[in-house]
Image (spheres, rainbow, N blue to C red):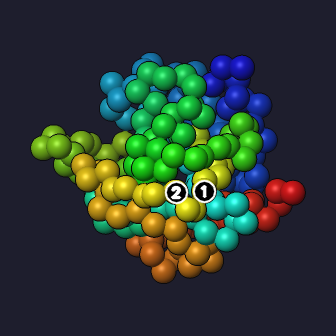
């Protein structure tokens, strides 16, 4: 199934996801280059919310641009296999080697605003990340490494303490939504 069909078949968890799915589908139907950064207004990103086996901890990075503990993920950069992108980004950003999807289905659809910033000496205008997220599981005994051009820390954080580490109010709400959704998985 291709990435657009995956998004179309996704069943939203709440009203926020209903609205965000509609926005993402609107963008798919009306915009070019969503899988690349060539679209300056919005582009598809793929992220992984990485939990340990007993779902008590989340693997997070200290994101240099946002100055906050954050989940892993990145731009699709033309790749239509968004689960592959989420896993690739997780490995690159954390050094983790043993990681697998809890499900190959999309875990969450979210439209995330990105404020203007400077990356690698370039000005990046405000834009939207059309986020396709997957729930991943990793071995918390794997060695962790920092990807210095993107983050300055990698660690397992108790799932109920994320709000103590993240400084992004909107992202804390997102992580809280993820944590509630995890409790519904059998």
Using residue 64 as the reference point, say whether residue 166 is left or right of it: right
* Element assignment for label 2: loop
Closer-to-camera residue (114/96): 96
* Element assignment for label 1: loop
Residue appearing at x 77%, y 31% in the figure: 9
Using residue 97 as the reference point, say whether residue 93 is left or right of it: left
Residue appearing at x 48%, y 80% in the figure: 164
Q: Residue 30, position in %: x, y?
A: 52, 22
Q: Mark 1 and 2 residues: CB-CB less than 8 Å, in contact?
A: yes
Residue appearing at x 52%, y 68% in the figure: 156
Corner quadrant of residue 178: bottom right
Compared with 122, 154 (above or below) is below
Numbered circle sitting on residue 43: none
Q: Residue 186, position in %: x, y?
A: 87, 57
Q: Residue 23, position in %: x, y?
A: 58, 38
Name the quadrant of the N terminus. top right
Residue matched to label 2:
142
Corner quadrant of residue 78: top left
Residue appearing at x 64%, y 24% in the figure: 4
Residue matched to label 1:
139
Could you classify mark 1 by the number of other residues whose Cα lies within 10 Å: few (under 14), some (14-19), or many (20 or more)? Answer: some
Q: Residue 34, position in %: x, y?
A: 46, 26
Compared with 108, 51 (above or below) is below
Using residue 55 as the reference point, say whether residue 168 is left or right of it: left
The residue most toward the left is: 121
Closer-to-camera residue (34/140): 140
């Amino acid at each position: 199934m291709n990435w657009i069909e995956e998004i179309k078949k996704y069943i939203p968890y709440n009203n926020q996801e209903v609205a965000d799915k509609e926005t993402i589908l609107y963008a798919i139907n009306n915009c070019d280059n969503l899988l690349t950064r060539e679209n300056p207004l919005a582009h598809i990103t793929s992220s992984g919310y990485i939990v340990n086996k007993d779902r008590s901890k989340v693997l997070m990075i200290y994101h240099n641009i946002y100055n906050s503990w954050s989940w892993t993920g990145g731009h699709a950069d033309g790749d239509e296999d968004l689960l592959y992108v989420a896993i690739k980004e997780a490995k690159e950003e954390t050094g983790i080697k043993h990681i697998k999807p809890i499900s190959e289905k999309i875990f969450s659809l979210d439209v995330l605003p990105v404020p203007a910033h400077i990356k690698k000496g370039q000005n990046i205008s405000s834009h939207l990340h059309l986020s396709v997220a997957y729930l991943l599981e990793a071995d918390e005994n794997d060695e962790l490494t920092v990807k210095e051009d993107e983050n300055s820390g990698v660690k397992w954080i108790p799932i109920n303490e994320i709000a103590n580490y993240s400084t992004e109010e909107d992202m804390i709400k997102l992580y809280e939504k993820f944590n509630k959704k995890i409790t519904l998985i059998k």
